[in-house]
Image (cartoon, helix red, strand yellow):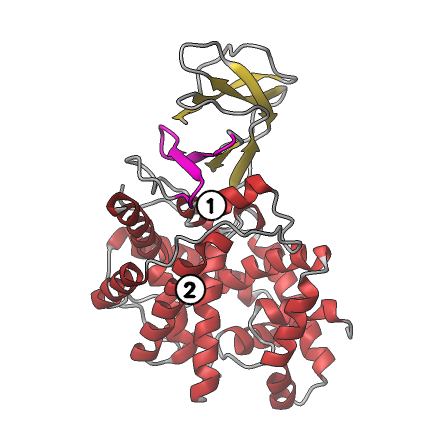
Amino acid sequence: MALLARSEQSALAEIYDRYGRIAYGLALRVLRDEALAEDAVQEGFLAVWRNAARFVPERGKASTWILTLVHRRAVDIVRREERRRADTLENAPEPGGGDVHEDAWLRLQRERVQEALKQLPDQQREALELAYYGGFSQSELAERLGQPIGTIKSRMFTGLARLRELLGEPGLEMSWTPSTT
Amino acid sequence: MDSIHDLTAAYALDALDADDAATYEAHLGQCEQCRAALAELSDTAASLAWAVDSPAPPARLRESILSQAAAERSNVVPLPQRRSAAYRATAAFAAVAACVAVALGAWGATRGGGNGCSAGWHCSALADGRGLVAVDQTGQGVIVVNELPKAPSGKTYEAWIIPKGGAARPAGLFPGGGGTTLVKLAQTVPRGATIAATVEHAGGTQAPTGTPVFTAQA
């Protein structure tokens, strides 16, 4: 039993070391508050821990699953706290310090996704950013932007589909090179 | 844009209200097309996480998560008793899903022989740490390998079950490629057998000719 526990815990530690930072950055972006972002990441990773048996590898990437759980917690919190912010990516703060290799890798990925986002039509990018980073629901977006809800749905769908094309395959997870092993 | 299918993108972005999300989730159980679309759009939505700055989280967060997880110990869950229609899980895939090491990505976390399986299953790490073999009490087995390159043109991977002191038995062909390769072994696995895979000519052979790509002790 002790071995079992150690092995699973080291697996969780490894997951955290791989995705904790990106998850924290995401939660911080949505919540704009370090303590709340920590809460969202903690709840998200504990959901990973509790639901590990429900993850079906052939249905998706582990990183998507983990980030989805953390994002959902962040959105739940932001809606509860009514803290959501609507400013754009350009207004985001500069990254802090950290491991040089990891910084370089994360910067590369960041530039890649930002570049793809820039190529989207403004209205699609706006819908994706307000929904994903702002935590706005589609009905709130419709109201905020003064558009029918069908238009908002359509912008989100077309924007995501186009972004998928721009990013291309394979996904981000595949290009990961561990900095330690 | 007014059918429930159109909620897929909004759901992937977590942009549905609680009621709509519940409605969509109920629909998801019955719509294979939506599950496939959602898997794709969720990947893309998650890639948005990479577009923002990611300052290092405080060290206490890692400790807090790990200690809370240790306190809960609730990740060892029994296998689902009924097949989930939503995921069409075969027994073998459910077994795999139940292997925590796999569920957490199977990137070598099982190295060192830790058994992260639920009751009734045994998981063994592949020798190179890239995946594992799960075998149930009846000897039904499945191999999980991460990031196995696609077999070269005109070739295939072939799985082998090598009983202790016996000759290798062919246990199925698979192409590789993609993120995670799952192979249901075509024969039961005797206790203590070695599981291996080699690259063979398309169509497979009756005895392995190549060097093993990976091996594991069942």
Image quadrant in which you'd find residue A118: bottom right
Q: Residue at x 51, y 12 (%)?
A: B208
Q: Indicate left or right for B145 with B25 as reference.
A: left
Give the magenta-colored segment's residue range. Answer: B117-138
User: Is B122 colored magenta in this rendering?
Assistant: yes
Residue carrying label 1: A174
State the image coordinates of residue B46 (x, y, percent, origin top left). Answer: 50, 62
State the image coordinates of residue B141 (x, y, percent, origin top left). Answer: 51, 31
State the image coordinates of residue B50 (x, y, percent, origin top left). Answer: 44, 62
Q: CA distance from mark 1 to mark 2?
A: 23 Å
Which of these two is toward me, B189 or A131? B189
| Label 2 SS | helix
Which of the two labelled residues, at mark 1 and mark 2, occupies the earlier sequence position? 2
Return the mark for residue B113.
none
Image quadrant in which you'd find residue B192: top left
Task: Nearest to the eye among marks 1 and 2: give it.
Answer: 2
Which of these two is toward me, B50 or B213? B213
Residue carrying label 2: A47
* Chain containing mark 2: A
Type of amino acid under label 2: Ala
Q: Indicate left or right for B44 with A12 as reference.
A: right
Disc 1: CA contacts within 10 A as few (<14), some (14-19) or many (>=20): few
User: Is B142 colored magenta in this rendering?
Assistant: no
Image quadrant in which you'd find residue B70: bottom left
Relative to A1, is A21 above or below? Answer: below
Total numbered badges shown on the rendered structure: 2
Which of these two is toward me, A59 or B88? B88
| Label 1 SS | helix
Q: Residue at x 39, y 30 (%)?
A: B126
Q: Indicate left or right for A143 with B63 as reference.
A: right
